[in-house]
Amino acid sequence: FDPSMINSLVTEIQGTYGCLNITCEDVGAYSDGTGTVVVPQCGTGPANATELKSYSFAGYSPTTNVTYILNLYADVKEINDASSIEAAKTIFLHGASATERPLANYSTMAGSEMVN
């Protein structure tokens, strides 16, 4: 490890936040045990997390935007954490993160089985 490369390494990691569907605010700053900020919080992150950018993670560079899949996973977690059946059903039918194509769009029975 070359300590002179730390700023470049941090910038590379922060550049993957949009692909991971997180923001600089989600991650925050890194402080040592004394409270001294070692790595400050980065800027505001990508304006649009669904915007296709060129990312490389562990040597793999996706050629298509798959952020919508991350949004589906986020909705599954929201359904699992929902406070009621009605809240879970609303997320399934309309999405919380995957609002453009919610989970119900992938179900062939949602329209007939989830009437009430």
Image (tube, rainbow, N blue to C red):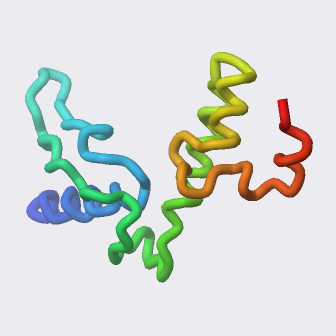
Q: Nearer the viewer, residue 12 or 116?
A: 116
In the rendered view, does 49 fall on the left or right side of 108?
left
- Residue drawn at the location 61% of the way across and 57% of the way down: 101
- From the image, which quarter does the C terminus lie in? top right
Quadrant of residue 40 within the rendered picture: top left
Furthest residue toward top? 83
Q: Image quarter for residue 77?
A: top right
Q: Relative to residue 93, is residue 80 depicted above or below?
A: above
58 or 48: nearer the viewer = 48
Q: Quadrant of residue 32?
A: top left
The answer to whether residue 10 is above or below residue 12 is above
Residue at x 25%, y 45% (from the top left corner): 24
Q: Nearer the viewer, residue 87 or 6?
A: 87
Percent across and percent down for residue 18 are 35, 58
Residue visible at 56% across and 43% down in the picture:
74
Asked if 95 appears above or below 106 in the picture, the reply is above
Q: Is residue 18 left or right of residue 32?
A: right
| 49 sits to left or right of 116 | left
Tell me if 31 is positioned left or right of 60 in this view: left
User: Which residue shows up at 64% across the image and 24% down it?
Assistant: 82
- Location of residue 22 in the rendering, given as x and y in whole percent from the top left corner: 37, 48
The extreme bottom residue here reads: 63
The total of numbered circles placed on residues is 0
User: Front-most of 108 and 7?
Assistant: 108
Image spot of residue 15 (x, y percent): 27, 62
Which quadrant, please, contains the N terminus?
bottom left
Residue 97: x and y, percent?
51, 45
